[in-house]
Image (cartoon, rainbow, N blue to C red):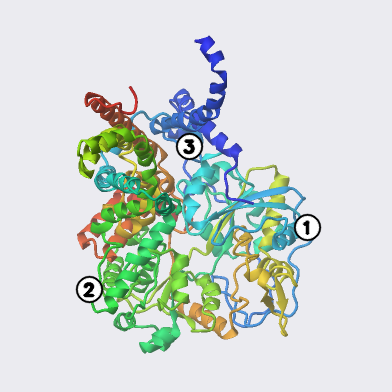
C-alpha cells in the first residue's frame, strides 16, 4: 500500500487539487446538512443553534407544497428524459454521418454555441418571440388570426422548459456521443456492408451496440439528478405561471431557505434530494449490471 | 469595490459548514429561552431623537414635517455648510448597500468616489448588491461572520429575522441618538420623526439611522398625451377618475400593441395603487386595537376583482409577470405602455427618460369603492443603516459620517453628494443650477455609487433635468393626496412572528394574488390562500402587532 503510494506519488500530486476541491466544497459543505436537525438561522451562527432532532423532516413530509414541488420536478424530469435525452444522440448520429469535415465542423460549432448563452438571455429570447407581446403573437394579431398564449400559460410551461433546454443544450450534449461514435471500429462497418447490410441495419447492429455502454452510463447518471431540472431556468420563469405549475424542488428550497429564512427546512429538502438521487443511481446501476452492462461503476 | 466573494470568505464559509454538525449537538439542551424576542412591548423605550430641522433655503412650494416635501423650482443661490471639520479618521470603512445601477468604477479612476472619500475623511470600501440578488446575498452575509462597518437594510425588502440579526450583531445607538443626544449630529436631528418611527425600535432601542422618504407611496404615472387620447388626462390631474372612466379609458387605449397599464413582476400588477384606490388598508388594519392583514379585507378582494377585469380586458402589458421593473420603465419610456406604477421618487428618472416626447404626470387615485380614492402612504423611509458593534469612538466617527451624508438640501455637502464635483460631474447654467455632464450621465453618478442609501437628506422636490412646472405638478399631487393617505399601523412595530415568517408567507400570498389577477384561480382559491397566510404566521403577527401597538400608543 505505502509502496504504491510512493510509486504513484506524481499521480497523487495531480489528484490533490481535485481531491481538495471535493473535500472542502462537497464533503465539507455536506456536513452543513446537520442544520436540518437544528433551529439554525443565518444571523445566529452555528454555535447558538439548538438540536431539534428529525422534527423538520416530519414538517416537510407533512407539507403539501413540498410534495407538489417534488411532483412538478418529476414531471419535468420525465419529459426531459423522453424528449430531451434522445435529441443529442440523434444529432450526434446525424453529424457523424456527414462526410465533409468542413461542413461537420461548421455545424458542430453552430450547435454548441447556445450552450454558452446564459439562461437569462435564453429565457428573454423565448419571451420576446413567444410572449403575449412577442413577435409570433404580433404577427398573428396583425394578420387577424387568433393569438396563442404560451408564456404565462401554466399548461404550456413544462413543454416550454423542455423546448428551451433542447434548443440550448442538445448540441453540447453531442460531444460525448460523438467521442463514443469515433471509437466504433470501422472494420465492423466494412464487414457488415460486405454482408449486405443497409444503413438502418448498420445503425441497429453496429453503431448502437458499440455506443450502448455510453448511453447507459449517461442514463444512469441522469437518473441521479432526477430531482434537479434547471434551477436558474425555472426561477426566471416561475413567477409568470405561479407555483402550481412552476414550483420545482430547487426553487421551493430557495424560497424556503434564502427568501423565507427557514434554513433547516431547506437543508432537509436538500438531504431528501441527495438521498433519492443516490438510491436511484445505485438501483439503476444494479439493473444495468443485470442487463450485462458496465454501468457507472462495478 | 466588488460584489464578488473572495477566496478567503469562501473557505471560511466551507469551514463554517463543516462545523455545523459538531457544535449544535454539544449545546443540545439550550432552549429558546436564551433568545429573547425583538418586540418593544414591555421593554423600556429609548425616547425618539429630538427633531431640530436644519436651516434650509425658503422653499417655493412649502412642505410640512409630516411627509409633504418642500419643493424648489429653482436652485438656491447661496449654499450653506452643514458640517464642520472632516468627520472621518482616515480609516477604512466597509459598507454594504443595495443598488439599482451598474457597479461603480474602482476608486483609482472614480472621481466621484475620490471626492466623497476626501470630504468624509475615510477610505470607503462599498459593496453593492444588485436588487435582484439582494435576498440571496444578504442571507449569505448574515450567515458569515465577516460583517462590514455599515449595512443599509432597505429597498422594501424585509429579510427573515432581520430584527434579531440587527439586535444581536449591531451597535445600540440609543445613547448617541435618543432625545437631545442626537443634537451632536445636527443633520441626523433634522430627519423628521415619522422616518424614525417608520424604522421602529428593537427591544425598545434605537438601532439604526433612517434614510428618509416622503409620505406618498406608490402611484400611477401616466403618459399625458396618450391618456389625453382617451379624453382622461386632465381629470387624472384635477380630480381623479371614477372607476368606470378609468376602466373604459384603459381598455380603449390598449390596442395596436400598446397597453394602458405597464407592470412588472416586482409590482404585482400595481396592486398597491389599485388596493389604495379601493380603500383597502395599507397592509394592516387596526380596529379597536385588533390587527387584520389587508389581504383578508373585502376592499382588497374587490380591488383584485377589478384588476382581474382589467387584465382580461387586455389593459395590462401581456407579459407583465416576466419583466423587471427596469424593463417596465423602458417600455413606459418607449410608449409601449401608457402608464406605470412606481414609487414617488421615480419622477426623477421617469420624467427625464421621456426626453420631452410626452409629459409624465402623476394620476390621482381613482374612485374605487365607497371609501375609495385613497393613496397608500410609504413607510417614510427607504431603509435604515446600522453600525457594527465597535468601541464608542468608532461608532461616533461612523455616526459623523452618516451625519455628513444626511446634510440637507441647499448645502455644499448636499451638492457634492447629489451632483458631484463642479467641472467634472456638473457645470452651472446661467441661474447657477447644476447641469449634469457626460461623466455623470455616463456612469459616474449616485445611481451607480449609491452612497445615498447609507445616509441621505430629508428628500425635497428638486431634480436637475426636471422642469419647474413638473416639480409644481408633483408637489400639487402630494398636497392633494395628503388628506387621503392611508398609513400602515404596523410600520415601526416589531413582531417576532413577522421577523420569522413574514418573508416566507409574503411570497405565497403574492403568488396567490398573481394567479387570481391572471385569471388562473377562483375567489375561493384566494380565500384559501388568505386562510393559509393567517395560519402560517399572519394571525400570530396580528396578535403581536396588537400588543406592540397598545404599548406604543
Q: Nearer the viewer, mark 3 or mark 2?
A: 2
Label 3 to label 2: alpha-carbon separation: 60 Å
Kindly indicate whether the residue at mark 1 contacts the one at mark 2 (C-beta within 8 angstroms): no
Do marks 3 and 1 share a subunit? yes
Reply above or below: B381 against A8: below
> Alpha carbon of mark 2 to alpha carbon of mark 1: how far?
67 Å
Image coordinates of residue B340 in percent, x first then y, are: 42, 73
* Residue that extends furthest to the right in the rendered view of this protein: B85
Q: Chain of mark 1?
A: B
Relative horizontal placement of residue B199, taking residue A158 as reference (left or right): right
Is residue B359 toward the left or the right of residue B53 in the image?
left
Q: Residue at x 72, y 60 (%)?
A: B116
- Pinpoint residue B454: horizontal percent, then vertical percent: 61, 57
Q: Which mark is residue B86?
A: 1
Residue B219 shown left or right of residue A189 in the figure: right
| Residue B35 numbered mark, or none | 3
Asked whether the beta carbons under mark 3 and mark 2 sit within 8 Å of each other, the answer is no
Q: Residues within 10 Å of mark 2 (few under 14, many from 20)?
A: few
Q: Which residue is mark 2?
A: A146
| Quadrant placement of the C terminus of chain A | top left
**Residue A132 in which image quadrant:** bottom left
Q: Give the mark toward the camera: 3 or 1.
A: 1
- Going from N to C along the chain, the mark reached first, 3 or 1, is 3
Local packing at callout 1 (Cα closer than 10 Å; few below 14, some 14-19, many 20+) is: some
| Depth order, front residue of A255/B33 | A255
Judge if badges 3 and 2 mark residues of a common chain.
no
Mark in front: 2 vs 1: 2
Q: Is residue A11 left or right of residue B32?
A: right
Residue B283 in view of the camera: no
Amino acid at each position: 500500500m505505502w509502496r504504491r503510494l510512493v510509486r504513484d506519488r506524481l499521480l497523487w500530486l495531480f489528484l490533490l487539487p481535485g481531491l481538495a476541491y471535493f473535500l472542502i466544497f462537497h464533503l465539507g459543505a455536506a456536513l452543513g446538512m446537520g442544520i436540518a436537525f437544528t433551529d439554525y438561522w443565518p444571523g445566529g451562527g452555528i454555535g447558538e443553534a439548538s438540536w431539534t432532532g428529525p422534527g423538520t423532516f416530519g414538517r416537510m413530509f407533512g407539507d403539501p407544497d413540498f410534495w407538489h414541488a417534488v411532483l412538478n420536478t418529476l414531471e419535468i424530469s420525465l419529459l426531459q428524459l423522453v424528449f430531451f435525452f434522445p435529441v443529442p444522440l440523434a444529432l450526434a448520429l446525424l453529424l457523424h454521418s456527414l462526410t465533409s469535415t468542413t461542413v461537420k465542423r461548421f455545424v458542430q460549432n453552430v450547435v454548441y454555441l447556445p450552450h454558452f448563452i446564459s439562461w437569462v438571455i435564453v429565457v428573454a429570447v423565448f419571451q420576446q418571440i413567444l410572449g403575449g407581446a412577442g413577435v409570433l403573437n404580433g404577427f398573428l394579431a396583425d394578420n387577424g388570426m387568433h393569438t396563442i398564449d404560451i408564456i404565462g400559460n401554466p399548461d404550456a410551461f413544462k413543454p416550454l422548459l423542455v423546448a428551451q433546454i433542447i434548443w440550448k443544450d442538445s448540441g453540447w450534449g453531442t460531444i460525448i456521443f460523438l467521442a463514443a461514435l469515433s471509437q466504433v471500429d470501422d472494420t465492423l462497418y466494412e464487414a457488415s456492408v460486405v454482408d449486405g447490410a443497409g444503413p438502418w441495419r448498420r445503425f441497429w447492429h453496429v453503431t448502437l451496440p458499440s455506443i450502448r455502454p455510453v448511453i447507459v452510463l449517461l442514463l444512469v447518471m441522469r437518473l441521479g439528478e432526477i430531482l434537479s431540472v434547471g434551477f436558474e431556468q425555472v426561477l426566471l420563469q416561475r413567477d409568470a405561471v405561479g407555483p402550481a405549475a412552476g414550483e420545482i424542488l430547487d426553487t421551493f428550497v430557495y424560497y424556503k431557505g434564502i427568501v423565507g429564512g427557514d434554513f433547516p427546512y431547506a437543508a432537509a429538502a436538500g438531504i431528501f434530494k441527495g438521498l433519492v438521487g443516490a438510491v436511484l443511481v445505485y438501483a439503476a446501476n444494479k439493473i444495468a449490471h443485470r442487463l450485462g452492462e458496465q454501468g457507472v461503476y462495478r | 469595490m466588488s460584489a464578488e466573494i473572495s477566496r478567503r470568505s469562501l473557505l471560511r464559509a466551507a469551514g463554517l459548514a463543516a462545523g455545523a454538525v459538531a457544535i449544535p449537538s454539544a449545546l443540545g439542551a439550550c432552549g429558546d429561552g436564551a433568545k429573547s424576542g425583538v418586540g418593544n412591548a414591555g421593554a423600556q423605550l429609548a425616547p425618539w431623537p429630538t427633531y431640530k430641522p436644519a436651516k434650509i433655503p425658503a422653499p417655493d412650494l412649502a412642505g410640512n414635517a409630516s411627509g409633504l416635501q418642500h419643493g424648489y423650482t429653482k436652485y438656491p443661490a447661496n449654499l450653506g455648510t452643514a458640517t464642520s471639520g472632516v468627520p472621518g479618521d482616515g480609516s477604512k470603512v466597509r459598507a454594504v448597500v443595495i443598488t439599482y445601477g451598474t457597479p461603480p468604477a474602482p476608486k483609482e479612476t472614480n472621481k466621484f468616489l475620490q471626492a466623497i472619500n476626501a470630504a468624509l475623511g475615510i477610505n470607503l470600501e462599498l459593496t453593492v448588491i444588485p436588487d435582484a440578488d439582494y435576498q440571496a446575498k444578504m442571507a449569505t452575509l448574515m450567515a458569515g461572520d465577516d460583517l462590514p462597518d455599515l449595512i443599509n437594510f432597505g429597498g422594501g425588502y424585509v429579510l427573515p429575522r432581520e430584527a434579531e440579526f440587527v439586535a444581536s450583531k449591531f451597535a445600540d445607538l440609543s445613547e448617541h441618538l435618543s432625545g437631545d443626544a442626537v443634537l451632536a449630529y445636527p443633520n441626523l436631528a433634522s430627519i423628521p420623526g415619522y422616518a424614525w418611527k417608520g424604522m421602529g425600535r428593537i427591544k425598545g432601542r434605537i438601532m439604526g439611522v433612517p434614510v428618509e422618504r416622503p409620505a406618498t407611496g406608490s402611484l400611477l404615472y401616466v403618459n399625458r398625451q396618450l391618456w389625453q387620447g382617451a379624453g382622461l388626462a386632465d381629470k387624472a390631474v384635477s380630480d381623479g377618475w371614477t372607476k368606470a372612466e378609468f376602466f373604459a379609458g384603459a381598455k380603449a387605449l390598449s390596442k395596436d400593441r400598446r397597453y394602458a397599464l405597464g407592470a412588472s413582476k416586482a409590482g404585482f400588477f400595481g396592486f398597491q395603487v389599485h388596493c389604495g384606490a379601493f380603500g383597502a388598508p395599507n397592509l394592516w388594519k387596526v380596529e379597536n386595537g385588533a390587527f387584520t392583514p389587508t389581504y383578508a379585507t373585502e376592499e382588497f378582494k374587490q380591488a383584485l376583482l377589478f384588476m382581474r377585469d382589467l387584465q382580461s380586458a387586455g389593459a395590462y402589458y401581456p407579459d407583465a409577470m416576466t419583466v423587471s421593473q427596469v424593463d417596465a420603465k423602458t417600455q413606459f419610456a418607449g410608449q409601449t405602455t401608457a402608464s406605470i406604477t412606481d414609487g414617488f421618487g421615480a419622477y426623477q428618472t421617469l420624467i427625464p427618460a421621456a426626453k420631452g416626447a410626452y409629459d409624465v404626470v402623476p394620476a390621482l387615485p381613482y374612485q374605487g369603492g365607497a371609501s375609495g380614492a385613497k393613496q397608500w402612504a410609504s413607510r417614510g423611509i427607504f431603509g435604515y443603516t446600522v453600525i457594527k458593534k465597535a468601541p464608542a469612538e468608532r461608532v461616533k466617527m461612523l455616526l459623523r459620517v452618516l451625519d455628513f451624508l444626511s446634510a440637507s438640501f441647499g448645502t455644499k455637502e448636499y451638492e457634492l453628494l447629489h451632483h458631484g464635483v463642479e467641472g467634472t460631474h456638473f457645470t452651472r447654467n446661467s441661474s447657477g443650477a447644476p447641469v449634469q455632464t457626460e461623466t455623470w450621465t455616463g456612469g459616474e453618478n449616485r445611481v451607480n455609487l449609491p452612497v445615498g442609501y447609507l445616509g441621505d437628506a430629508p428628500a425635497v422636490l428638486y431634480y436637475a433635468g426636471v422642469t419647474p412646472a413638473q416639480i409644481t405638478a408633483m408637489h400639487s399631487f402630494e398636497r392633494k393626496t395628503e388628506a387621503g393617505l392611508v398609513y400602515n399601523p404596523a410600520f415601526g412595530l416589531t413582531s417576532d412572528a413577522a421577523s420569522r415568517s413574514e418573508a416566507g408567507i409574503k411570497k405565497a400570498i403574492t403568488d396567490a394574488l398573481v394567479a387570481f389577477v391572471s385569471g388562473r384561480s377562483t375567489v375561493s382559491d384566494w380565500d384559501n390562500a388568505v386562510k393559509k397566510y393567517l395560519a402560517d404566521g399572519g394571525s400570530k403577527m396580528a396578535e403581536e402587532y396588537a400588543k406592540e401597538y397598545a404599548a406604543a400608543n
